[in-house]
Amino acid sequence: MTPISRVHKNQGVKLFIQTVIARAYPRLIGQQREKSWMFFDIVLPLLSVSAYVFIYRAINAPEDYIGFVIIGGAMTAFWMNVLWSMSSQLYWEKEQGNLALYILAPNSMMAILLGMALGGMAATTLRAAVIMIIGSWIFNVHYAVVSFSQLFLVFLLAMVALYGLGMMSSSVYLLLSREAWHISNLAQEPIYLVSGFYFPIKNFNFWIAAGASLIPLTLGLDAMRQLVFTTGASLGFLSVPIELGILSILCILFLVGSRYLIGYMEKLAIREGRLTESRR
Amino acid sequence: MRATSLKPFVRSFHLAAWLGWQIESNWADPFLFAIYSIIKPVSAAAILVVMYSVITHGNFAAPIFSYIYLGNAFYIFVGQVMTGISWAVIDDREHYKTMKYLYIAPVHFPTYLLGRGVARFIIAAFSVLITILFGVLFLKVQIDLTEVNWLLFFVSLMIGVIMLAMMGLILAGVLMLLVHHEFGIGDAIAGALYLFSGAVFPLEVLPTSLRWIGFVNPITYWLELLRRSLVGQVAQAFPTLSTLSNMQILIILITLSITFTIISGYCFRWCENLARERGLIDVVTNY
C-alpha cells in the first residue's frame, strides 16, 4: 500500500489571496486568448467617441470639450466593465452553474468579488488607456496637468469606489434572474447622461449633480477634468479637495456595504432557493 | 406551388418573431416594460441635447438642431434592428443553449434570425416615436404634419429597415465565429457606424480621407431621406447631399440595399459553414 500524500491546503489570508488571484486570472488571460476583443473593445468604442467629438466640432465647441469627450469615452470602458462583468456577472455564473460551486467551495465570496474587480480593473485600464492615448493623438488634445499626485489619487479613489459599487450591486443581482440583463442594459445611457461622460455636470441643477455624485465616476470625471484641462477648474462642479473627500467616503461606504450585502443576499438567496434557479 | 415553398420561411419568421417578443417583453409587467423602453432612448437623445445646449446656450430653433435630433432619433433603429438579429446567435447558443436544436429542426435559420429581430424593431419604433414627440413638444423640432411627405417617409423607412436587417444578418454570421463578448455587439457596431452615417453631423465635418465611408454607407442616404420627408427645408440646407434629388437618393439607397442583401447572403453562409467546421454551433464561452 502506498501512503496517501497529504494535500497542502491554504487557509485564512492565504486562501483569500489565492481565491482573489484565481478569480482575477480568467479576466486577464481570457482576453489574451480572444484577440477579437481588441476590435470590439477598443476600435469600436473609439469610433463611437469620435462621433461625439465631431458633434462638438460641428457646433464649434471650444477645444477643451474634445478632451472632455475623450476622457469620458475612455471612462465608459470602466462603467461597462462594472455593469456587465461585475454587477451582472453573478447572474451569468448562476446561469452557467458556477455560482453554486462558488458557494460550496471553502472560499470567501468577498475574495471572489475582489478577484473579479481586480482582474476586470486591470484589463479595463489597458483598454481605457489605449482609447485615451489614440483618441488624444488623433484629435490633438492638449493636457495641462495641475497635479499628477492629485490626479493619481482621484483615479485610484474613483476606481476603488466604482468597483466597490460593482461588488455591492453584484450581490443584489444574486436575487435577479432574466431582468438582470435588462437592468444592466438600462443603466448605460441614463448614467452617461447624469454622470456627465461627455459634458461637465456643472451644467445640471445642483441637486441633480449632487444625486449623480453617488456614482463614483461622476466626481472622478469632474475632478480629472479640473486637473488636466486649463478651463477645467472653471467648469468643475465642486473643488477637487471636496471631491476627493466625497470619493474617499464613497470608497468606504461601498466596500463595507458590499461586505454586508453579499453576506445578507447569499443567505437570502439560499433561503429562497435562488442560487440554482434559472428562469429563462 | 409557390405558396407551399414559401411556407417554411413564413413559419420560421412568424414563430421567431413571437418567440423574440416573449423573450424581450415578458420579464416585466407591461407598464415597467414601457418605462424601460422609453428611458433608454430618451436618455441617449438627452445627452446630445445637453451637449448642444451647453455650447449654443439653448438655441434649439437653429436648423442644425433638428438635423441632429432627427438623425439621432431614427438611428435608434440601427442599433436595435442589428442587435435584435445578431444577438439571437449568442442568446440561443450560450444562454438558452438551443442553437443546435434549431439546426436539427425544420427551421430556416437565417429567416429565424430575421424573425428574432422583429421584437426589437417594434420596441425601436415605439422609442423613435416617443423621442420625436418629445423633441416636437419640448425642443422646437420643426415638424409640420401637413407638410410631411408621407409616401417618401414610409417607403424610405421600409427599405431602410430591410437594409438594416441585412446588415444584422452579416453581423449574426460573424458572431457565429466569435465568443460571447460582454455587451451587445450590435450596439457597438451601430455606435461605430454612427460616425460615418451623417446621423448627427454633416459628413463635411469628417476629414476628407474618411468621407467616402459615409458615402458608401446606405444609412447616410436612408437618414437623409427620412429627414427630407419630415423637414425638407432643414435637411436640404446642409450641403452633404444637397445636389441630389429625393428620387436619386432613393435609387442609391435601393441599389446599396440590394448590394447588402447579396453580401449578407454570401457572408452568412460562409460564416455558418466555418462555424460548423470548427464545431462552434453549440460552443459556450464566458469569462
Image (spheres, coloured by chain):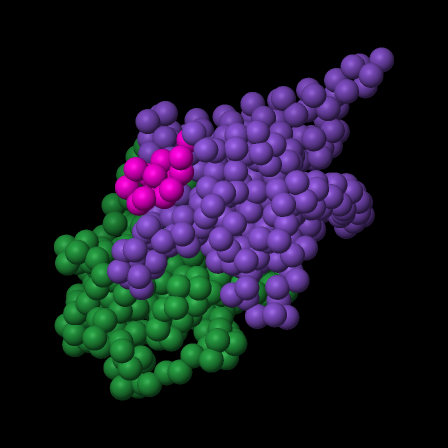
Q: Find residue B260 and report its image quarter.
A: top right
| Residue B56 at x, y percent in the picture | 31, 61
In terms of depth relative to the viewer, which is nearer, B81 or A83? Answer: B81
Q: Is residue B140 magenta?
A: yes
Which residue is painted at 38% across and 48% down in the image?
Answer: B45
Residue at image x 47%, y 80%? A140
Q: Is residue A21 left or right of residue A41?
A: left
Q: Is residue A67 magenta?
A: no
- In the image, which residues are magenta? B132-145
* Residue extending farthest right: B1
Residue A255 image offset from top left, x and y in percent: 25, 61
Report whether residue B279 is seen.
Answer: no
Horizontal placement of B199 versus B168: left or right? left
Query: Horizontally, is A164 left or right of A78 in the view?
Result: left
All told, the count of numbered labels is 0
Residue B286 image point, x, y percent: 55, 51
**Residue B269 visible in rendering:** yes
In depth, the one of A180 and A56 nearer the eye is A56
| In the image, residue A89 above or below residue B133 | below
Chain letter of the purple region: B
What is the drawing colour of chain A?
green
Q: Name which residue lies at 61% across and 42% down.
A: B246
Relative to B126, say whether A186 is above or below. below
Judge from the rendering whether residue B278 lies leftward or rightward of residue B199; answer left or right: right
How far across and down, in percent of the image, does residue A124 sit?
A: 46, 67
Image quadrant occupied by the N terminus of chain A? bottom right
* Front residue (pair B124, B170): B124
Q: Quadrant of residue B30?
A: top left
Decide which of B51, A258 is in the foreground and name it: B51
Does residue A135 lie above or below B40 as drawn? Answer: below
